[in-house]
Amino acid sequence: MDGSRINGVPVTEEILTAQGYRKYIGAELDIYYNKDICAHIGNCVRGNPEVFEVGRRPWIIADNGSLEENIRVVDSCPSGALKYIRREEQ
């Protein structure tokens, strides 16, 4: 799944927040999460536990992973509960 799109349309902060996503800010990449559509498959936590750690607040720290690694992990989310926007695109 492409974590930078919804139904083929590039995501924006406005679209994501209107759909209930919460923003986790990083230096190069903002990661967005929607708990209401999460299927709890765990690809994120297994993909990079330094970035995605359920027992911690905040549970997503984007700067704990590289830009490429974060995109790879977000793209592995089968439910679409994770999305991202590169900071340069905002």
Image: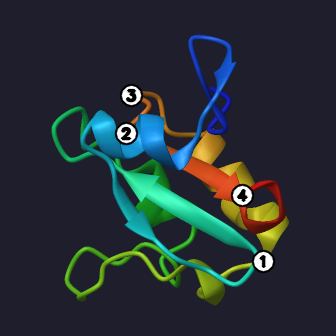
Residue 90 makes an appearance in the image: yes
Amino acid found under the numbered disc labelled 2: Ala
Precedes in sequence: disc 4 or disc 3: 3
For the point 45% across and 42% down, which residue is it?
14
Q: Quadrant of residue 3?
A: top right
Precedes in sequence: disc 2 or disc 4: 2
- Disc number lying in front (2 or 4): 4
Assess disc 4: are there few (<14), some (14-19) or many (≥20) residues with their C-alpha within 10 Å of its C-alpha.
Answer: few
Tell me the element at label 2: loop
Q: Position of residue 8 (x, y in %)?
A: 67, 13
Q: Which residue is mark 1?
A: 66
For the point 58% across and 41% down, which residue is it?
12
Q: Which residue is mark 4?
A: 90
- Please report contact status of discs 2 and 4: CB closer than 8 Å, yes or no: no
For the point 50% across and 39% down, which residue is it?
77
Left or right: residue 80 compared with residue 21: right
Left or right: residue 72 compared with residue 15: right
Give the number of the disc on residue 50. Answer: none
Assess disc 3: are there few (<14), some (14-19) or many (≥20) residues with their C-alpha within 10 Å of its C-alpha.
Answer: few
Q: Which residue is mark 3?
A: 79
* Above or below for 17 versus 4: below
Left or right: residue 17 compared with residue 48: left
Left or right: residue 66 compared with residue 52: right
Q: Which residue is mark 2?
A: 81
